[in-house]
């Protein structure tokens, strides 16, 4: 992020306007309510740009609910360094906190049920590990990190293999130790994969009523995950139908950022409104 922002050069505005020996204290401050994630990521960004030691005071921890105006992180360092690193730090902090906030909304709706909200591989290129961390901060569960650590047999695999059970059998034969999840879109396919010995089934675009029917049919013989047609309004109905997971790609591909800004303190230590998430 820093390399992209500097593009091999320097922060020309800051170098021209700020004395080299100037030191400043700044507060990363919430502009709206949400769940914070990425504080250590922001600190890591600043550690790269800060040419001298800097002081950091963390007021909250990742996963905490935060309120508008609440201080999250206080940093004292060279003014030039903080100005150079603030946008990269804020970009990541706002992005990850937005994901954590969205995830917490789903987790709150599912509270009291057996179901957990789970992410997908629909992540931002290069940021998957961080975005999945943010999901955990929000109370969600991670699905596979990559194509190699677990198998997910989807409709195109089924077509290529000549059938849903056949696709499962081929993966099991080739990778006997890996977890295998199989996507189905009909009750007949549920029966077919159960007979084949599948232990994790993805119910794609099932209604809550169809989901309840599938849960009754499976009767504890496999873990069930719902996908498609899921909204916050419908989430509880799917959870009450008895599934174990709700797969929500929107957690990482559509969550809005959480507005967080950096406020520089004046000489008298009173905060002065600074850069926000929209700058």
Image: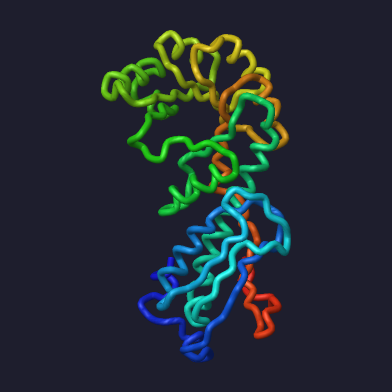
Relative image position of residue 190 (x, y in whole percent):
50, 14
In this rendered view, identify the residue nearer to me: 102 or 264: 264
Relative image position of residue 262 (x, y in whole percent):
61, 71
Please give the count of numbered marks on the rendered protein: 0
Relative image position of residue 175 (x, y in whole percent):
29, 24
Is residue 278 in view?
A: no
Considering every residue shown, the one lying at the far left of the view is: 174
Q: Image quadrant for the N terminus?
A: bottom left
Colour scheme of this structure image?
Answer: rainbow
In this rendered view, identify the residue nearer to me: 51 or 194: 51
- Tell me: 94 left or right of 45: right
Image point 61% across, 53% down: which residue? Answer: 36
Image point 56% across, 65% down: which residue? Answer: 57
Write down the quadrant of residue 257 in the picture. Answer: bottom right
- Tell me: 89 left or right of 242: left
Relative image position of residue 41 (x, y in whole percent):
48, 59
Is residue 250 in view?
A: yes
In this rendered view, identify the residue nearer to me: 177 or 64: 64
Q: Image quadrant for the C terminus?
A: bottom right
Image point 51% across, 20% down: which residue? Answer: 223
In this rendered view, identify the residue nearer to me: 174 or 52: 52
Write down the quadrant of residue 171 in the picture. Answer: top left
- Tell me: 172 left or right of 278: left
Image point 46% across, 41% down: which residue? Answer: 121
């Amino acid at each position: 992020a820093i390399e992209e922002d500097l593009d091999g050069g320097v922060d020309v505005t800051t170098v021209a306007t700020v004395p080299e020996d100037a030191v400043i204290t700044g507060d990363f401050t919430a502009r709206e309510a949400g769940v914070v994630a990425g504080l250590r990521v922001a600190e890591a960004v600043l550690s790269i740009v800060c040419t001298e030691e800097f002081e950091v005071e963390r007021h909250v921890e990742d996963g905490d609910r935060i309120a508008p105006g609440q201080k999250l992180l206080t940093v004292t360092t060279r003014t030039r360094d903080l100005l150079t690193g603030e946008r990269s730090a804020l970009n990541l902090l706002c992005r990850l906190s937005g994901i954590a906030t969205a995830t917490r909304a789903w987790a709150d709706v599912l509270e009291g049920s057996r179901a957990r909200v789970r992410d997908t591989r629909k992540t931002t290129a290069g940021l998957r590990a961080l975005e999945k961390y943010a999901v955990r901060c929000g109370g969600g569960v991670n699905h596979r990190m990559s194509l190699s650590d677990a198998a997910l047999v989807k409709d195109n695999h089924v077509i290529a293999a000549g059938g849903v059970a056949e696709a499962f059998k081929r993966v099991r034969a080739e990778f006997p130790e890996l977890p295998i999840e199989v996507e189905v879109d009909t009750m007949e396919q549920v029966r077919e994969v159960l007979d084949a010995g599948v232990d994790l089934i993805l119910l794609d675009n099932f209604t809550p009523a169809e989901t309840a029917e599938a849960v009754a049919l499976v009767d504890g013989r496999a873990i069930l995950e719902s996908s498609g047609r899921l909204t916050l309004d419908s989430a509880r109905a799917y959870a009450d139908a008895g599934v174990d997971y709700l797969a929500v790609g929107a957690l990482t591909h559509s969550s809005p950022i959480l507005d967080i800004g950096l406020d520089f303190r004046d000489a008298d230590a009173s905060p002065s409104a600074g850069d926000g998430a929209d700058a």
